[in-house]
Amino acid sequence: MLLKINARCNCCLENMTALIHNGRLTTKCEHCGEVPFIINPVNGVVYIVSSPLQVGVKIGMTEKSVEQRLMGLNATGTAGKLMPIAIFPSAKPKANEKKVHDKLLKYSLGKEHFDLTPVEAVLKVFRTLGRNRPIFYDAEVEKKFDLQLKIDKSSMEMRL
C-alpha cells in the first residue's frame, strides 16, 4: 500500500509531503534532508466493547480489525450485539492485553469481561497502557472520558 501524507517535519517543523510504502517511510524532508518522523508499527489493538444486554465490558486484543473481531464474537451467540467503545493501537497487543487484565483483576467477571462502565474501562486502560489517547467509536463515551480527565487534572492541581 502506498500512502501520501501531508505532515510537519519533527526536525525543522516545516510542512512537507511524505510517501509511505508498505509501512516504510520512503522520503526525507525536502527542507532539511532529515528523516521527518518515525513510523511505529501497530500490530494490533486492545479493544473495549460492550453490549446493552450484558453487565460490564469486554476487554480483549486482536491483530485484525475490530470490525472483523466483532463479527466473530457476535456469531458465537453472545447475549446482545457487542459494539465497539474504543481501541488502543499497540505494537505488542498480546502483552498489553495481559497487562490490562492483570491490572483489572479485581473487576473481573471471568475471561475478558470486567464489571466496569465503558468510561471507567477506557480510563483504566488509558492509564495502564501509558496514556496514549484511544480511538473512540462512541462519541458519548469520548465526551465523558475527556470531562473526567479534566476533573482528575483539576483535582490533582488542587492537591499540589
Image (cartoon, grey):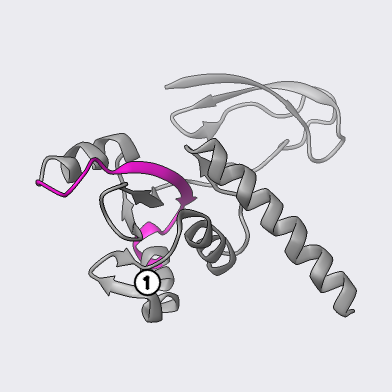
Residue 81: in magenta span:
yes
* Residue 100, above or below 74: below
Query: In the rendering, at what x and y percent does residue 145 appear?
Result: 62, 52
Residue at image location 25% in from the left, 36% down from the top: 68
Let me know if residue 57 appears in the view: yes
Amino acid marked by disc 1 = His
The image shows residue 107, relative to residue 35, as above or below, that is below
Q: Quadrant of residue 96?
A: bottom left
Decide whether residue 94 is among the magenta residues: yes
Residue at image x 38%, y 42%? Answer: 84
Residue 65 shows in this picture = no
Which residue bears the numbered disc 1? 101
Q: How many marks?
A: 1
Q: Is residue 104 left or right of residue 160?
A: left
The one nearer the camera, 115 or 59, is 115
Percent of width and height locating residue 69: 25, 42
Residue lying at 12% horizontally and 40% vertically, measured from the top left:
75
Please give the range of residues in magenta: 77-95
